[in-house]
Image (spheres, rainbow, N blue to C red):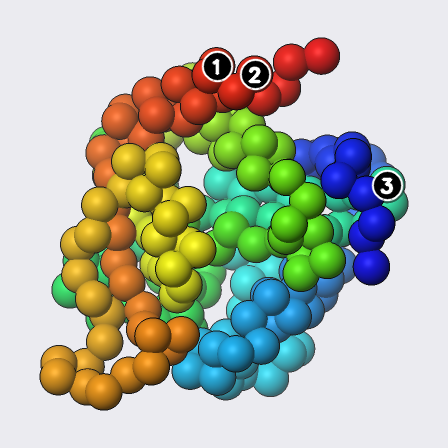
Amino acid sequence: MVDSNKIEVKSCSKEDLLSMGINVAQLLRVITAIDEDCNPEEAGCSLLEEPYEAVVARLTPVFDATPDMWRAFMHEDEIIGYWNCVALNNAHQKKIEDGLLRESYINVNNLRDDIHGEEIDVLFDSVCLHKDYQRKRLSGVVIKSIYDAMSALPSKGIKVNKVWASIWSKAGIKFFSKLGFAAHKENNPDNADIPDNEKHYIYYVNFNDMIANLENIVKEHGFGRE
């Protein structure tokens, strides 16, 4: 267990991890386990319906192909969490908007062929910290990491229109609402009697609004200041 609320956590890019000798496959093995540890009650989560190595194999090429759209969090030499976005092709973007997204759809074959040029939508696939770090006042690290990476996308020729989020928990709804996301669709069978901890929601926000909200939060709370 982590004892102190005074924890120094770094936001690391693919390049940062490689410089430490950690490749993307190694990262995915750790964060897949973190996802499972963070969501033990979510038996309906499609992530848990795949064998562990199948999830790693499916997502490793996705992370490898989209280095600008994710970051890992490290405490000392331990990976403790991550966030990631993906830009899916038009057919699977439509599935998001129709509330039909499934975790298994997020694979390298369903990514957009080119994310540069025309405006695209992106999906927040996950924001997750290891359970031992979840109540350690690290929201500032997460928000600053998302702000730094996402606000840099336009300078890299990646023009984003809307950002979508696939949410499985009330804590997730609270977090994304803080960033300006609004409800789009409940991604559950109509009239189904589903326990609250198994319900799935699709939220969205205009990219520029999200960046403005992130910037305001960073400035208001002084995240990232020495």
Residue type marked 1? Lys
Residue type marked 3? Glu
Comparing labels 3 and 1, the label whose residue is closer to the camera = 1
Q: Residues within 10 Å of mark 1 (few under 14, many from 20)?
A: few
For the residues labelled 3 and 1, the Cα–Cα distance comes to 26 Å
x, y percent for residue 101:
29, 68
Q: Looking at the rendered structure, which numbered label has been put on residue 76? A: 3
Q: Residues within 10 Å of mark 3 (few under 14, many from 20)?
A: few
Q: Contact, CB < 8 Å: mark 2 with mark 1?
A: yes
Residue 71 versus residue 212: which sits nearer the camera? 212
Disc nearer the start of the sequence (2/3): 3
x, y percent for residue 11:
67, 35
x, y percent for residue 183:
20, 52
Query: Callout 3: helix, strand or loop?
Result: loop
Residue located 84% across and 49% down the image: 3
Residue 185 versus residue 193: which sits nearer the camera? 193
Residue located 60% across and 66% down the image: 38
Q: In the image, is residue 148 above or below residue 19? A: above
x, y percent for residue 194:
28, 83
> In the rendered image, which residue does mark 2 sit on?
222
> In the rendered image, which residue does mark 1 sit on?
219
- Left or right: residue 214 versus residue 99 is right
Q: Can residue 164 be seen in the rendering of this structure? A: yes
